[in-house]
Image (spheres, rainbow, N blue to C red):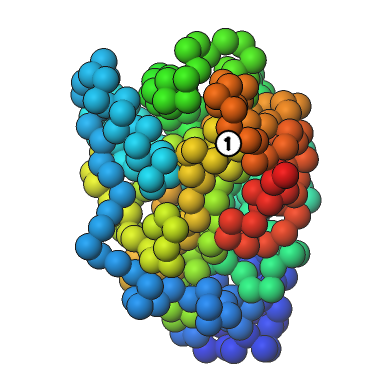
Amino acid sequence: MAPSPSMDSNSWDVISFAVDKGHGVKGLADLGLETLPKQYIQPPEEQITNSTVVTDDSIPVIDLSNWTDPKVAEQICHAAEKWGFFQIVNHGIPIDVLEDVKEATRRFFDLPAEQKNKHSKDNSPTNNVRYGTSFTPKAEKALEWKDFLSLFYASDDEAAAQWPSACRNEALDFMKKSEFVIRRLMEALMKGLNVKEIDGTKESLLMGSKRINLNYYPKCPEPELTVGVGRHSDVSTLTILLQDDIGGLYVKKLDSDSWVHVPPINGAIVINVGDALQILSNGRYKSIEHRVIANGIKNRISVPIFVNPRPSDAIGPLPEVLEGGEKPIYKKVLYSDYVKHFFRKAHDGKETVDFAKI
Ligand code: OGA
Ligand code: NI
């Protein structure tokens, strides 16, 4: 039966429509549903309420116009230790590159479902390109109100052959134009750990592979009952996140139960530490829980670049960090095993990192 706006979600197969046929939550939103399908209703403890949000504090905003100033490196390390999250301005990535990748994201999600679904897990000829909805629909008790296209970078030729043409060039351009920022951030963070030089081995551990996601959070009926993305930390070393001007990303304050909003700043980029860097730094840099609310008024997009170790790398605390006699709190784990563990379960806050705890 074809779904219509007034139909309740008991009378048609929402999962088949949104997940299997590839219409996604954008397809649900386009139907003009008046109520949220029950499959998306999150348990009350996952719904984001004002009572846990604080407005008198916020993640640092770091001005990178003066890279060589040692104070800038200090600010970066301090933010990575105390917040695990910060925004950067005057970073040198041209504003056109940022605007173009946002536009390309809208262009991709505006394609008909049949075209997007050619890139689904079941249909895509390559594992490096994956269109999907929610996070892991098969493992989740309640779905998340988000569609995504995830692109693992293998090479320019592979991207040219496999990435969807609606967004390929813009996604690649954002990845390339952000490379020097990533390198400088890593250099500053490594100095803070007493690592003098990023040699070949460290280069691989810190930024040996990359994945770029295009996220689409359509306008949602009854947004307070669901989430855009549930509580999680990233499995990256660093994440470079471009968001549009809608807002809705919340970050947990270190050692507290409070959440702070990450306000959109035109031209800024959000940076966060992921689990891999938390492990490499033996817990010095914090991979912090974050989540995204659903929005009842507007569509939102975001474009994270996940900077990762290579899948074949073993990650554990760096020798330089342990030099002074500090006890390791993580063991060495194969990065591909770590990532597999993350994708086997629904979003569950900070629990992934236990996989590497001693
Ligand atoms: C993510 C994520 C935040 C956002 O994709 O891991 O946390 O604002 N996204 O979309
Ligand atoms: Ni994230």
Q: Which residue is mark 1?
A: 282
Residue toward you, 64 or 139: 64
Q: Nearer the viewer, residue 7 or 101?
A: 101
Residue in view at x 64 percent, y 73 percent: 142
Seen in the picture, residue 56 relative to 63 is either above or below; the reply is below
- Residue 81 vs 70, above or below: the answer is below
Quadrant housing the C terminus: top right
Residue 280 visible to the viewer: no
Q: What x and y, as percent, mark residue 214?
A: 50, 45
Callout 1 environment at 10 Å: few (<14), some (14 to 19), or many (20+)? many
In the rendered image of this protein, does residue 336 appear above or below residue 300? above
Instruction: Name above or below for residue 186 compared with residue 102.
Output: above
Q: Is the CB of mark 1 within 8 Å of ligand 2?
A: no
Circle 1 SS class: loop
Residue 307, picture quadrant: top right
Q: Nearer the viewer, residue 59 or 159?
A: 59
- Kind of residue sitting beneath label 1: Asn
Describe residue 325's horizontal placement relative to residue 127 as left or right.
left
